[in-house]
Image (cartoon, rainbow, N blue to C red):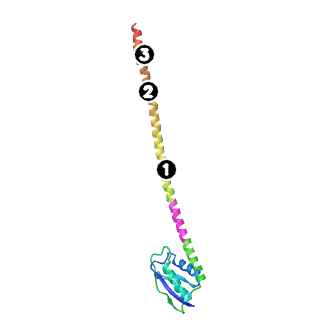
């Protein structure tokens, strides 16, 4: 058994690299973990047979999380004095950290949704009020049009009466002359 450490750099934090690595460690005969470093790298610490560590390293060069862009990996440094944390405890710590981030993310999303829905409700209310005012104005115009149509009906009836009188006028003149 031996111990090794290597680093993965270039946009490897907040893309799921540690979860990816710890999951692969748990599926392998190795022990170890992956941690974020202050410079933005991910530090991978492993304990196991040298050939398994090298094989694991080669697999990681081929596989990466979907959101990782173009990671650069340092060569494994073998060091018997290296302290390698227990994989299970590390993975539990990592999962709790990820869960905590998820809870914070969900709370932030909830706040954004509430703000968005409140804004949308205000816009809908404004829109409906405007539609209501427009409909009220249209109803008033329809009422005015109906009144004009009613007065036109009266004019039409008057014209019909005049026409009838004009049609009967020659007959009445003829009767009056004879």
Q: Which residue is drawn at 50% across and 54% down?
A: 124
* Secondary structure category for the residue under label 3: helix
Q: Does the magenta stretch include residue 73?
A: no
C-beta proximity under 8 Å, tags 1 and 3: no
Q: How far apart are marks 1 and 2 (CA)?
A: 40 Å
**Circle 2 — which element?**
helix
Tell me if mark 2 has few (under 14), some (14-19) or many (20+) residues whose alpha carbon lies within 10 angstroms of its own: few
Task: Using the image, tell me which numbered label, if any, was put on residue 168.
Answer: 3
Q: Earlier in the sequence, mark 1 or mark 2?
A: 1
Mark whose residue sits in front, 1 or 2: 2
Q: Give the number of the disc on residue 129.
A: 1
Near-viewer residue (116 or 69):
69
Find the magenta span and give its range.
104-117
Q: Residue at x 48, y 82 (%)?
A: 8
Instruction: Please tell me in which quadrant of the rendered image residue 101 appears.
Output: bottom right
Q: Where is residue 63 in the image (x, y as percent from the top left)?
A: 50, 77
Q: In which quarter of the image is residue 83?
A: bottom right
Q: Which quarter shows the N terminus?
A: bottom right
Which residue is under mark 2? 156
Q: Is residue 174 above or below residue 8?
A: above
Which residue corresponds to the image point at 54% horizontal and 71% vertical from the top-left? 104
Q: How crowded is mark 3: few (under 14 residues within 10 Å), some or many (20 or more)?
A: few
From this view, report whether residue 143 is shown above or below residue 99: above
Image x and y of residue 84, in percent = 56, 87
């Amino acid at each position: 058994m031996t111990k090794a450490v290597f680093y993965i750099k270039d946009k490897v934090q907040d893309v799921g690299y540690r979860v990816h690595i710890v999951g692969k460690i748990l599926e392998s005969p190795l022990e170890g973990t992956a941690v974020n470093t202050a410079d933005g790298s991910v530090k991978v610490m492993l304990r196991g047979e040298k050939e398994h560590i090298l094989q694991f390293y080669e697999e990681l060069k081929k596989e990466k999380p979907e959101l990782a862009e173009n990671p650069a990996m340092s060569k494994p440094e073998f060091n018997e004095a290296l302290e390698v944390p227990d994989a299970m405890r590390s993975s539990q710590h990592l999962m709790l950290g990820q869960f905590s981030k998820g809870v914070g993310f969900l709370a932030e999303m909830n706040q954004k949704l509430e703000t968005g829905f409140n804004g949308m409700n205000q816009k809908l209310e404004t829109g409906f009020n405007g539609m209501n005012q427009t409909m009220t104005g249209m109803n008033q115009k329809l009422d005015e049009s109906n009144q004009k149509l009613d007065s036109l009906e009266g004019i039409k009836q008057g014209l019909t009466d005049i026409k009838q009188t004009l049609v009967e006028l020659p007959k009445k003149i003829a009767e009056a002359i004879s």
